[in-house]
Image: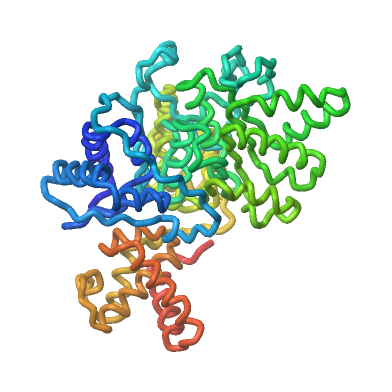
């Protein structure tokens, strides 16, 4: 099934569930599940935490509305296949599971909620903000901006204003150091296979700050993938929906600077009042505290104070907790105590979606761009390291364009971006190309390669094709599974099996090399 069809179906299912499930129960479930695949008689749903899967399986008050909604929307009963994504993606950091949740009464009144579903494939979500008292002065049209990094002009930086707090002590708290970027929001964040779990976890935190399941939320990923955007989106959403909470968003560098200044000026008590009496603490690039011994101690004490009082903590880092050697074990264990959400490099489809979103942003600001699809695909293919490099290439291209060069075609794009590309991929290999080449190599029909026959003459080439889709194209497991009409775990098994077999089977190793040569024979030599 095409991703946009699954997206539409899933949103309809969620709306049906909401009508028949108490709001508090719907809240817990909706943010922790997402669709993976819809086959003829099955719908596969990913569960972000093990206890959610167990809850659905054990409680009819949860499973029955879900079954009924699926049947109503799809017009036929489907077998519900629940998949624990912690196990499938190999999360080995400890996750605190919530205690058994009492099921609320079905008599609770229905209440309209604010929800954005998370999908397997890239999707740009455009919707009007809910009409509430706190955002009545905001524009209804969502703002679309590129992923991080982005410099926001000073004139539109969010101004700090006095807000109430839920803190028991009436202490003055200076939030001027908080650097929330008001343009980083959930509704202009593009999701794909590489970031769907962090995105869903971030949404949950924004709705339930201080909740046990995602506290602290530790967002891990290499530089330039959107961690900062996601962290700021949490803070902005909390400010809109719960303006009585005090939110502090700060970089680790700024945290260190404030701590050192407080010591120099003898204002340690003021520093502690500021950071230990807020409701939400968000620190970007926490790994930079590793070599700051005094600051680490102060941070540890602040962390404990907030955590013990049920306050939300969000951290971003390009280093996993286990690899932070300069942090004491007591600090690393705190990082791992909640939920570690991992971001990966965006796949090709996500990069294309990001570029199209950038183009939409320019057009909405009356900078009319006309870029041919070949040029968009070319950029997405070349700049695959992170969102930052992709955004830089896009800015370079449009800065060089003029009315005379419209529409921007592939030839113009290659010429302008030539100096930014170290190793040009002239054409790219996709899943379908691999399926075609493998079918031809083993002299079998493509329909048999993709079919259900388990004979070795079909199953073995099928596993090789699945392996190559991951090894050559670096496609995500869910995307490969969809292309082969298989389960996610089937692709994992095939990749692991072929990977291990190559090292000890020279004949297989030779076959893989020959197939790769045939894949490359259809394209020009790389420059």
Q: Residue furthest left?
A: 75
* Residue plotted at (29% across, 52% down): 57
Dividing the picture into quarters, in which one does residue 180 lie? top right
Can residue 167 be seen here? The reply is: yes
Q: In this view, does 499 lie above or below 13?
A: below
* Residue plotted at (47% across, 79% down): 500
Q: In this view, does 83 lie above or below 400?
A: below
Provide residue 308's location: percent of width, then percent of height.
62, 36
Q: Along the horizontal axis of the image, is 150 left or right of 111?
A: right
* Residue plotted at (35% across, 46% down): 33
Nearer to me, 309 or 504:
309
Nearer to me, 518 or 244:
244
Q: By what rule are the colours in the image chosen?
A: rainbow
Provide residue 468's location: percent of width, then percent of height.
40, 70
Can residue 416 be seen here? The reply is: no
Where is the C terminus found, in terms of image quarters? bottom right
Dividing the picture into quarters, in which one does residue 144 lie? top left
Nearer to me, 430 or 501:
501
Q: Along the horizontal axis of the image, is 258 left or right of 85?
A: right
Nearer to me, 363 or 10:
10
Q: Is residue 26 above or below residue 485?
A: above
Q: Is residue 9 above or below residue 483?
A: above
* Residue plotted at (41% across, 53% down): 50
Provide residue 343's location: percent of width, then percent of height.
51, 49
Provide residue 315's location: percent of width, then percent of height.
60, 40
Q: Along the horizontal axis of the image, is 226 left or right of 10?
A: right
Q: How many labels does the image show?
A: 0
């Amino acid at each position: 099934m095409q991703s946009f069809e699954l997206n539409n179906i899933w949103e309809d299912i969620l709306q049906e569930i909401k009508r028949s499930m108490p709001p508090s129960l719907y809240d817990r479930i909706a943010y922790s599940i997402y669709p993976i695949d819809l086959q003829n008689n099955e719908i596969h749903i990913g569960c972000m935490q093990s206890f959610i899967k167990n809850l659905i399986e054990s409680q009819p008050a949860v499973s029955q509305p879900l079954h009924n909604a699926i049947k109503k929307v799809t017009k036929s009963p489907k077998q519900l296949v629940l998949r624990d994504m912690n196990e499938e993606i190999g999360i080995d950091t400890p996750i605190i599971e919530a205690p058994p949740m009492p099921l609320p009464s079905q008599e609770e009144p229905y209440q309209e909620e604010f929800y954005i579903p998370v999908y397997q494939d890239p999707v740009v979500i455009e919707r009007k903000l809910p009409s509430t008292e706190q955002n009545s002065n905001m524009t209804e049209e969502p703002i679309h901006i590129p992923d991080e990094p982005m410099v926001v002009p000073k004139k539109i930086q969010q101004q700090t204003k006095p807000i109430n707090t839920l803190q028991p002590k009436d202490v003055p708290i200076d939030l001027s150091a908080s650097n929330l970027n008001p343009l980083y929001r959930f509704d202009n964040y593009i999701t794909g296979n590489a970031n769907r779990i962090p995105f869903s976890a971030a949404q949950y935190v924004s709705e339930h700050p201080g909740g046990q399941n995602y506290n602290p939320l530790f967002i891990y990923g290499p530089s330039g993938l959107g961690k900062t955007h996601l962290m700021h989106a949490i803070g902005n959403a909390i400010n809109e929906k719960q303006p009585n909470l005090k939110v502090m968003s700060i970089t680790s560098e700024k945290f260190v600077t404030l701590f050192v200044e407080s010591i120099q000026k003898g204002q340690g008590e003021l520093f502690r009042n500021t950071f230990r009496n807020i409701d939400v603490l968000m620190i970007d690039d926490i790994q930079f505290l590793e070599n700051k011994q005094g600051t680490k101690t102060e941070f540890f004490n602040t962390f404990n104070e907030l955590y013990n009082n049920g306050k939300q903590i969000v951290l971003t880092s390009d280093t996993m907790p286990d690899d932070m050697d300069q942090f004491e074990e007591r600090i690393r264990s705190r990082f791992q105590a909640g939920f570690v959400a991992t971001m990966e490099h965006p796949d090709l489809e996500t990069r294309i979606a990001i570029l199209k979103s950038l183009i939409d942003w320019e057009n909405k600001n009356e900078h009319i761009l006309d870029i041919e699809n070949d040029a968009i695909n070319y950029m997405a293919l070349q700049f695959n390291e992170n969102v930052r490099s992709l955004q830089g290439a896009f800015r370079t291209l449009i800065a060089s364009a003029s009315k005379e060069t419209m529409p921007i075609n592939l030839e113009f794009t290659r010429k302008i971006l030539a100096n930014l590309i170290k190793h040009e991929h002239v054409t790219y290999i996709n899943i379908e190309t691999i399926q075609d080449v493998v079918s031809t190599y083993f002299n079998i029909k493509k329909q048999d390669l993709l079919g259900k026959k388990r004979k070795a003459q079909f199953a073995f080439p099928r596993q090789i094709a699945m392996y190559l889709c991951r090894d050559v194209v670096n496609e995500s497991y869910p995307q490969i599974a969809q292309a082969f009409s298989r389960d996610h775990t089937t692709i994992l098994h095939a990749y692991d099996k072929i990977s291990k077999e190559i090292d000890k089977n020279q004949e297989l190793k030779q076959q893989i090399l020959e197939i790769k040569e045939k894949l490359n024979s259809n394209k020009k030599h790389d420059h």
